[in-house]
Image: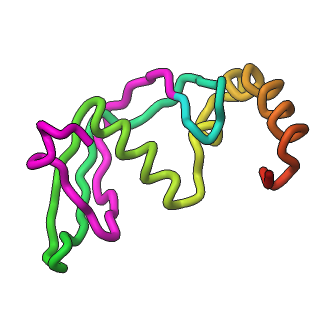
């Protein structure tokens, strides 16, 4: 995190998105799990999250804009979903050659 903003950083234990906005937007996303790839992903503009803090107390937080997008992206990983799973058919087709390269380099399961 940012050394100057550490007081505003939040640790959330077992987060759960409990509400999604009806309003969405489409932005270009990438992921360190898939180098040299990106694509447009539709996500909610805001979300409400419930979680526990480090003391086990229930907390609620609303994320908007870029923070909401990042949270949804990272939350997807907890469910075994990655951003390429959210691409349109056209978007998936555009990254498929790079996916094929990664499979050729690292194997079907991604093992080194």
Name the residue at 22% across, 72% down.
52
Is 7 one of the magenta-colored residues? yes
Residue range (magenta): 1-29
Q: Nearer the viewer, residue 24 or 78?
A: 78
Q: Is residue 111 left or right of residue 15?
A: right
Left or right: 24 as drawn, with respect to 36: left
Position of residue 75 measured from the top left corner of the image (x, y, whole percent): 43, 53
Extreme residue toward the bottom, this view: 56
Residue 57 spot, x, y in % from top left: 13, 76
Residue located farthest toward the right when viewing the structure as drawn: 104
Above or below, 95 relative to 63: above
Residue lying at 33% horizontally and 63% vertically, measured from the top left: 16
Measured from the top left, where is residue 26 in percent x and y? 44, 23
Q: Is residue 98 magenta?
A: no
What residue sits 90% from the left and 38% below the top? 104
Which x, y percent locates residue 18? 29, 59
Question: Quick check: 98 above or below 73?
Answer: above
Direction front: furthest residue? 3
């Amino acid at each position: 995190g940012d050394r100057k903003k550490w007081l505003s950083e939040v640790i959330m234990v077992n987060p759960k998105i409990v509400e999604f906005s009806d309003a969405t937007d489409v932005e270009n996303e990438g992921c360190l799990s898939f180098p040299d790839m990106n694509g447009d992903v539709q996500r909610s503009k805001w979300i409400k999250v419930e979680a526990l803090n480090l003391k086990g107390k229930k907390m609620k937080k609303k994320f908007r804009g870029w923070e909401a997008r990042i949270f949804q992206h990272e939350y997807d990983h907890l469910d075994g979903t990655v951003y390429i799973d959210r691409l349109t058919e056209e978007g998936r087709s555009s990254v498929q050659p790079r996916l094929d390269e990664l499979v050729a380099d690292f194997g079907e399961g991604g093992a080194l």
